[in-house]
Structure formats: structure tokens, C-alpha cells
Image (tube, rainbow, N blue to C red):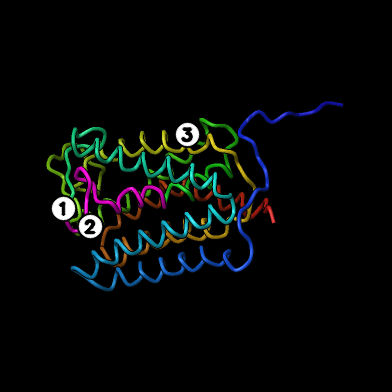
Amino acid sequence: MSARVYSGPRLDRGGGPTGLFKVVPWIFAGATVVGQIAWVLVSGDARALLTVVTVITFFLASATHAYVSRGLAWTAGYLGISLSVGWGIEALGTATQFPFGDYSYTDALGPAVLGVPLVIPLAWAMMSYPCLLAAQRIASKGLATALTGGVLFASWDLFLDPQMVGEGYWIWHRIDWTLPGISGIPLQNFLGWLLTACALMYALDRMPRKIVKDGVPIFMLSWIYLSNIVAAVIFFGEPAVALWGGACMGVVLIPWWWRGWSQPRW
């Protein structure tokens, strides 16, 4: 008889508070969906306001779910890493043009520190959480998780950047190579996202893995994927954006959906 020993990050069935507080992440998730639907239907200052509001509600959905399901220490680590990396890489990017290229933020997204609106690191944190969990569900080792999660996270920007640049929330000052069909966004930006996202996923994956019910991040990640495809095709007339984003995110999401359906944990 032999025994197999798992040498990767520790797994347990840890959790945080119970009771009615477990509903709070779903409330924030629902508010995010409603706000993003409204975002498509409005314009101007109302759209900019909803951009900030939905980032905050999505961030709170991720943060409260992490707290409820994984506990305070895990949540503090996740927020500390994702917020600091998100703000730090954006501050570096706007100051030096590395790794994303030559860009700057406008004042549309509110107060900024060193040229980076305060809402931007919240966006990094809100999305890094479901991307990490999806990568961990289908990858068992650190480098595999980092690459899988990094591809998933960076692919989100294929939807995000065309929308936000179109709204004038940030501006590219120099554009060289671009992806076919996505004009106005330098290829360097997407490569910079991939590099940073893989590093972020690797750092987050150093924390203990916990097997818990992840309904909220599953719902939010699926919503972001499907809603952005629909919005790109129907509301913004950007079929190439839908194709690039749908294909690149789908490389991870489709196997993730299959794993969740064929090997349910609960």
C-alpha cells in the first residue's frame, strides 16, 4: 500500500462568519449586475458614476465573500497583495510607460494618487479573486495556476480597455502594434497585463487553498464573461472585441465550467 502526499499549498475547509452575513456577498453581486446593465443604458456623467459604483460593489462582493468563506486572515492577505500590486503597477505604468505603454488617466474616475484613480486598484482586487479561484479549480501547481489565472485575468482587459478608452477614462499617447480588429489599444498593454496578472496570481496562490462554496465568484466571473460578449456585439458594435475576449477568456472558462459541472464539490 502506498500513500500520496500533496506538497502544494495547504487545503482545508475553512470559513468565516455564518448566518445572515453569508447573504451579503450576494447582495453586492446583485447590485453589480443591476448597475452594469444600467451602465449600458445611460451615458456621460451617469455612466462614469456607475463605473465607479459597480467597481465598488463588485469589490465588496469579492471581499465579503472571501471573508465569509475563507476568514479574516486570508482576506487580509488577498486584499493586501491585490490592492498593492494593482496600485503599484499602475503608478509605475503611468510614470515610466512600463509595462503597459504610454498612457494616462483622465479625471473622469475620481480622486487619484500619483496619477492612478483610487477605484483602479479596487478593480484589480475585485477581478483577481474569482480568477484565482477558477485557476485553482483546474490547476494543481503554482506555476500552472499562475499561468492559467494570468491568462484569464489578462483576457478580461480585452473587453475592458476598448470600453474604458471609448469612454475617455484613460488615454493612450502612443500606439504601435495592435491586435487585429482592436484599434486604439497597443499590443504592449495586453502583454503587460499578462505579465502582471501571472505574477499577481502566483503571489495570491501562495496563500492556503480552502475548499468552500464559491457561488458568488462563480456567478460573477460567468456574468462578466457572457455580458461582455453580448455588450461588445450588440451595444458597442465591436465583434472583434467579442471574438478576442470570448476566445481568450474561454480557453480557461470553458474547462472551468466543465470541471464544475462534471466534478461538483457540493
x, y (%) of residue 72? 54, 49
- Would residue 205 appear left or right of 44 to someone viewing this image? right
Note whether residue 104 is visible: yes
Amino acid type shown at disc 3: Tyr
Q: Residue furthest top?
A: 2
- Where's residue 81, x and y in %? 42, 40
Foreground of the two, 71 or 241: 71
- The numbered mark, 3 or 1, whose residue comes first in the sequence reads 1
Residue range of the region highlighted in magenta in the rendering: 106-126
Secondary element at tag 1: loop
- What is the crowding at mark 2: few (fewer than 14 residues within 10 Å), some, or many (at least 20)? many
x and y, in percent, of residue 169 in the image: 20, 55
Residue 187 in sight here: no
Secondary structure of residue under mark 3: helix
Instruction: Identify which residue is drawn at 40% across, 62% down.
Output: 57
Q: Are marks 1 and 2 in contact (CB under 8 Å)?
A: yes
User: Label 3: which residue?
Assistant: 202
Q: Quadrant of the C terminus?
A: bottom right
Residue sitting at x 29%, y 69%: 40
Amino acid beneath label 2:
Leu
Mark 3 to mark 1: distance in Å?
31 Å
In the picture, the disc for residue 109 is 2
